[in-house]
Amino acid sequence: MLLFLSFLISAIISNPCVPDGRQLARQSEEEFFDYACRIKLLELNKEESEASVRFIKDPAEPLTPYLETLHGLLKEQLTLRMGHAAKEVSRDFLDQKVHRLMKIFLKDKLGLQKPVTPEYDLANRAKWDPHFHGSSLFADHFPKARLYLPNYEEAYAYIKFEHRRLEDRSIFIKKAMEEESFAKVTEVCSSYDKWHIVHAGKRMIPILGHKKVSGAVDRHDVWGYDVCGLEEEDRYPSQKAFFESVQGSKVVRMHMGETIVPAKGREHVRLLLDEAERYYTSSKPLRIGHGTHISIEDMIRVAKKGYYIEACLSSNKRTGILDKRSDYPLGVMLVLGVNVVIGTDGGRLYSTTLPEEYAHAVRNLQKFHAKLKNSDAWVLLPNGDCLCYKHILPLLREENKKRGAERLEEGVTYKQLGAVLDPSVLERISSETLIQNANVLLEACYPSHSR
């Protein structure tokens, strides 16, 4: 059977209509993702399934023909996503990312993902999903979209294309969603969606997307703007013109810091905050979507400005932004006073729900608290930043402030952090803080829908 599968994969790859990994970059997007879907949907025999299980346990295991093909495919997807930044990363970095994505995909394919117990109570008390893209609802009707991951931009593009291609039949899909009291979707301005979310009996209207940011874009008929799809691995597109055009009380969310290469996301968030300080005039707090690779210095800036960061743990894991959900610096953000909230990024596409995301957040914080008691490791972020005494000096117990002032540039271990922080700071490293942040953000953005 293994010999047969090898022959089958060889036949697929040798087919001139379906490119192999060495030819993918020269093919059209349609051909590339047709190939990707065929590889990912390929039914595995017993030998390949067993080999996949061994790989999940130990990525150093020799790769079989199927795993070799899957490795090449995911590597090409990540390379395309990174653009010019791909030239700046090491082979080991890229292989590590590919191995993590292979394990996620194979666990899904073989039904080996361990389910998490959803935190329904926390999700209900939070009242809403602050980071939700309406297009993802169609992933239930177009499940092939999930096969486009980790290229989430292409997944959304595929959903939008399929939705429009349905023409009249899309009305029935929309109607079914409304009957579920989950969403009402209407296409607006050839960009992202305007939708109503009903959760825990509360109706609220999140942001209306606006993809084009050149020139004057302020509109009186929208709640605000969700600026997506602009961040790239190799450059930061200036938001000056957009910020200057936003007047009054419009809600603004900028997707930033969501990059495969941590240094790129770190730099993008810094530039965003630089421009926001000079040009952002809306009375609503600025919302930063993901903010995954934000620096510690910029966390402090965000906390002082009262901005919000919307964490999407499963999305970051399934798109290669993070290796593990626990890598998201949730605990460090709460220590520094960042208004961080939990979202799904459109849970349908990323095979998650808001109650599940709260469960993952609780687990993330539990691991953080355990480290505060037991770990002598430095408090390091995925972007390489190390928490130092200068970052936490105002947060220390009174008896520790003099000593901290003498060690400003020194790094802090988790155990040291747990020992020197003021008890009130330790208390806010909790799911209660996340719920409170979500409710305050809802009131600030949509006061008529928060009660």
Image (cartoon, grey):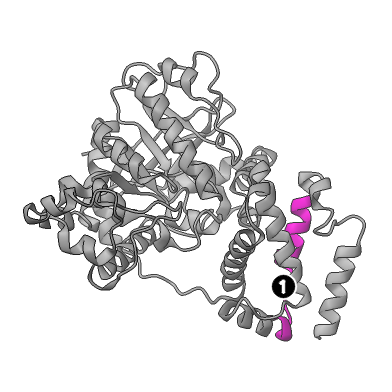
| Residue 146 point in image, percent of width and height | 61, 56
> Which residue ends up furthest to the left in the rendered image?
399
Crowding near the residue tagged with mark 1, few <14, some 14–19, many ≥20 C-alpha atoms within 10 Å: some
Q: Is residue 154 visible?
A: no
Between residue 289 and residue 422, name the one nearer to us: 422
Seen at 32% across and 53% down, the residue is 387
> Which residue ends up furthest to the top in the rendered image?
216
Q: Is residue 282 visible?
A: yes
Asked if residue 14 is positioned above or below residue 189 in the image, the reply reads: below
Quadrant of the image occupied by residue 375 = bottom left
Location of the N terminus (image quadrant): bottom right
Judge left or right: residue 127 versus residue 427.
right
Seen at 31% across and 46% down, the residue is 340
Most frequent secondary structure within the magenta stretch: helix
| Residue 107 point in image, percent of width and height | 57, 73
Judge left or right: residue 8 versus residue 276.
right
Q: Which residue is mark 1?
A: 67
| Residue 306 point in image, percent of width and height | 26, 34
Asked if residue 229 is positioned above or below residue 391 in the image, the reply reads: above
Asked if residue 318 is positioned above or below residue 176 in the image, the reply reads: below
Location of the C terminus (image quadrant): top left
Magenta-drawn segment: 32-48
**Is 31 colored magenta in this rendering?**
no
Judge left or right: residue 362 versus residue 109.
left
